[in-house]
Every structure is written in C-alpha cells, then in structure tokens.
Amino acid sequence: MAAPAPHRTPEDLEIARRAARTLVEFAYDAIRQDILCGALAPGEKLRVEVLKEHYHVGSSTLREALTLLVADALVTAEGQRGFRVTPISLADIRDITEMRKMLETQALRRSIERGGDEWEATLVAAWHRLSKVEERIYDDPQGLSAEWEERNKAFHEALIGACDSHWLHHFRDILYHQSERYRRIALTGRVVPRNVHEEHRAIFEATLARDADTACAHTAEHIDRTLQTLSRMFQEGDTPLPERRTATGAARRG
Amino acid sequence: MAAPAPHRTPEDLEIARRAARTLVEFAYDAIRQDILCGALAPGEKLRVEVLKEHYHVGSSTLREALTLLVADALVTAEGQRGFRVTPISLADIRDITEMRKMLETQALRRSIERGGDEWEATLVAAWHRLSKVEERIYDDPQGLSAEWEERNKAFHEALIGACDSHWLHHFRDILYHQSERYRRIALTGRVVPRNVHEEHRAIFEATLARDADTACAHTAEHIDRTLQTLSRMFQEGDTPLPERRTATGAARRG
DNA sequence: GTCAACCAGAATCTCGACATTTTTTGTTAT
DNA sequence: ATAACAAAAAATGTCGAGATTCTGGTTGAC
C-alpha cells in the first residue's frame, strides 16, 4: 500500500536539509509538513525504521524530531508502543474552534489597545498582499493556494502582532497549526470560498478603526465559518475521517 | 561551586527509575522535579555530559527527556548551543497570571455548566482533603507543604473536572506547572499565607451554589493574589531573580 | 592600542549496533 | 472448535563513540 499522498521529492528534501540548522530541525520540519498536508495520514503508525530510511537520518535524531512534534500535538507517543500521527475527530475540531475564538479575540483586543503606527503599517501591508492573491485566486486555485496559505497566515499574525503576551501567542500558534492541518486535509484541491475575502476585509477595517468589539465579533465568526465548512465536509463523508486501518483491508464503499 | 539546592538522593532516583515505564520518562520526571524545586536554577546551562552522569542515562535518552521538557517550556533549546533551564522574569509572571485567569475561569464556567452529581461528589471530597491539611499546616509547615501542594492541585483540578475541553485542560496544565515553579522558588521554606484557606472556601461555595460569576471572580482574585505575593518577594530582592552567574562571583549584598 | 584572523579545547549533534519489550504466529490440550 | 500457552519475529528503547560546530584566548598586522 503506497502513501496516501506524495511526499516531497528528494531534491526538496535536500534543499531543506541544507537550510536547517540541525538535522533534528530538518526532520522536524519535513515530518511536520508531511503531516499537515496529509502525506502521513491521521492515526497512522510512525515506524522509526521506515521514517529513518525515508528522511535519511539516524534513529536518535528521528526520535528527537518526533518528540518535538508531540509538543505540537501533531504526534502522540504511548509508553513503549511507539509514535503515531495524532488522530482527528469532529469533537477535536469543535474544541479547537472554541479555543481559537477565545485566544484569537483576546489577542486581537490587546493588539488593538497597544498597537502603534508601526503595527498599523505592517498590518496594512499584510492586508494588501493577501488581497492581491485573493483577487487572483480564481484564475489559478491550485497554483496560488500555497501562496494564499502563507499570506493568510501572515495577515492573521499581523492582526495580533501588537499583543505582547508571549503565552497567548504560543498557544494560539499551536492551535493555528492544528486547524491548518484540518483545513489542508479537508480542502485538498478545493477553492477558497468566495466570502472569505469579505470576512477578512471586515476584520481588517474594524481593527484599523480600533473598534475592538466589532473586530472580535468578525474574527469569531470567521473562525466559526471555518468550522462549519469543515464539519459539513466530514459529515458528507467526503473525507474519510477516522481512517483506521482495520484488519479487514477495504470495505466502506462496497 | 555546588548545586544551589540538593538534588534527590540516589535511593530516591533508584525507586523512581523502577516506577517509570521507560528511561526517558524517568529522566523527564527527575529533571522536571529538580527544575521545579530549584535544584536546577533558572537560566542554568544543562550540559548533557554532566546530567548524563548524574542521572545515569545515555546521551540520546537524556536528550529526548530534555526535548520533552522544552514542550513544557521548562527548558529552552537554541540551535547548536545546547539546552538551558528557562529563565524567569517578572514580565513572565504577569503574563502567566493573566493567561491563567482567562483559562481557569473559562474552564470553571464550563465545569459549573456541565457538572453533575459525580463531579460535585469529587469536588466535595477534594475540598475536604484540602481543608484538613490547611487547618493543620501551622503545626508543621515544612512537613505538610508537599502534602498541601498535592491537595491544592487536586482541589483546583476537581473544580474544573467537568469541563470537557481537552485543549483548555492541556494549556491550563502547562501554566499550572509554570506557576508551580515560581511558587516553589519564592516560597521555599515559607508558610502558606493565612487567607488562602478562606479564598478556597469562597471559590468552593460559589461553585457548589452554581454561581459561575462569583466563583470566577474569586478564582481570578485568587490567582492575582499569588502574583502579588510573588512580585513583592521579587521586588524585595529576597529571591535573586535573574540569577545570572556573572564572572564576578558574588556581590548584590555588599 | 585596536581589530581581525586563527587555533586549541569543549560541547553539541549524529549515527549504527545492541538490549528490551511488544506483537504475531504456531502448537497443544481441553 | 476454542482457549491458553510458548516461541519466533518485529519494533521499540538505550547506549557510547565519532563527526561537526561553537567558544574564547592568543597571535599578528595595521
């Protein structure tokens, strides 16, 4: 049985390997990408021997990288039974959404309170870059989706850039990566829904106007919409949610 | 220069070693305890060679344990420059306090909403156990402080036991451990302040009465008081906060 | 006298082999 | 036919040696 989605090419891996400061860092980034894009499926067992060969690193190095991923809750480790990709579930999506709404709005509120000219300038720039790609996204959904992903992330980070709470940022980052995973799994090859750009605009304008309540309301709604989209997809059975390799190989569709 | 506080005895380590499922787990617990109680001081460099000898484990094992501690933010790792105990600061205390107030009250609110008879029973029991030790704490402050620490933790966990958000619990746990570290460093050998018992009672009674607003208000105040106590101590210079080993050995008191 | 380059010494990072535990498979008795 | 037990197979967990990188002290040139 081949991998559910293609891993990155050996050339890409080679480039990343040189860019990384340490081999552990390289392995961490590589595995993380493969989990985020679904090449390593939720619930899948992560055999050290196999991964060792695939990424060309030693067992200790690989182990350390996996341990780092446990911190991000992208990988789970059980006693003496090795590692596996953290499973996904609807309940988990709901939980993540609730937490994100709380943390993200709180961070935005503080950012609006504290932000100065420098913050505004960065935000305007990030908004501009995101707008450009969102206007063109329908010309080339596939080619631009990586670009959109990056600029969308940058925009949301710019929004809360003036929030000075280290911990708030830390926890938010973890949840952002979690939801990024769900997004990528669910939206593989799909187009970004039409209204997202308008949602972003509403958040942006309220934030610049220093209207914290409105900005937070729009942000909460924005996050909620993502959840709704995802749960609809999961319920349609479009994406095989539990993805458990049962003893009886294939069924489900029969 | 000897360690600032005594590590645990070899016998204790031996017992813990047998109890742990894996050696990594053992090393993780041991180092964590030593960080929490201050045996490994904030900002201190963690040389693998030294720790390896102290805990009698291999370098890879130790490395993995340290990586796990990075996830708890008790240890920091920089590129190719090894590990060190995460430094402490007043700003960090403030940050942690703010986050704890937000997360803990949110969790309590949901717990009060969802909790049933079972939850109430567990809570009443935890409250009883805590009360017992808080009433006797003045007879033997030293001997009972470990007991108090454990029962205090159990009580606060019982309060939010009915909250079903996995992530909320996860983040709260991390911050609880962080503040536990600050508490232990600051309160070494001190008595628990008198009013803590009454604060606990206020939280407990409001919670059982299902008065979420009052319970949350008391909780926020409870957490804030801890901050105030700590900052006062740090500002008095009672505890050497930055604890940087400068070239010129001792000064500060001259 | 100041600055840059260089060179040990130390510490970190990486690896493959070995020990231990878990899982699977095969056998036997009820 | 089923269940319990035992041995083989697979995978995980552990370790110390060696390659790589960083540190700070010294030398030499300007």
Image (tube, coloured by chain):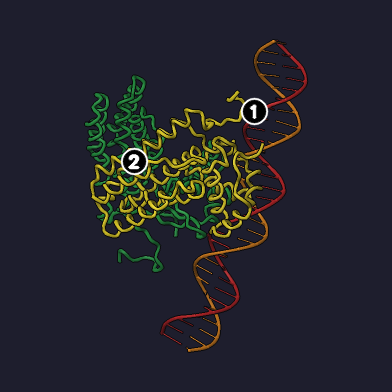
Chain colours: A green, B yellow, C orange, D red
| Closer to us: A205 or B14 | B14
Residue B11 appears left or right of A40: right
- Where residue B40 appears, as percent x and y from the top left, is 57, 41
Q: Which residue is mark 1?
A: B249
Residue located at (27% from left, 24% from top): A208
Residue located at (45% from left, 46% from top): B138
Classify mark 2: residues with Cα within 10 Å, few (<14), some (14-19) or many (20+): some
Residue B217 appears left or right of B33: left
Q: Which mark is residue B105?
A: none
Q: Secondary structure at mark 1?
A: loop
Query: Residue A123, can we see it?
Result: yes
Circle 2 chain:
A
- Which amino acid, by three-letter code, is at mark 1? Gly
Circle 1 chain:
B
Classify mark 1: residues with Cα within 10 Å, few (<14), some (14-19) or many (20+): few
Q: Secondary structure at mark 2?
A: helix
Mark 1 in CB contact with mark 2 (< 8 angstroms): no
- Where residue A105 appears, as percent x and y from the top left, is 29, 35
- Where residue B6 appears, as percent x and y from the top left, is 61, 44
Residue located at (56% from left, 31% from top): B243
| Closer to us: A2 or B33 | B33
Q: How many marks?
A: 2
Q: CA distance from mark 1 to mark 2?
A: 61 Å
In the rendered image, the vertical position of residue A222 relative to residue C30, given as above or below: above
Query: Residue B64, can we see it?
Result: no
Q: Which residue is mark 2?
A: A142
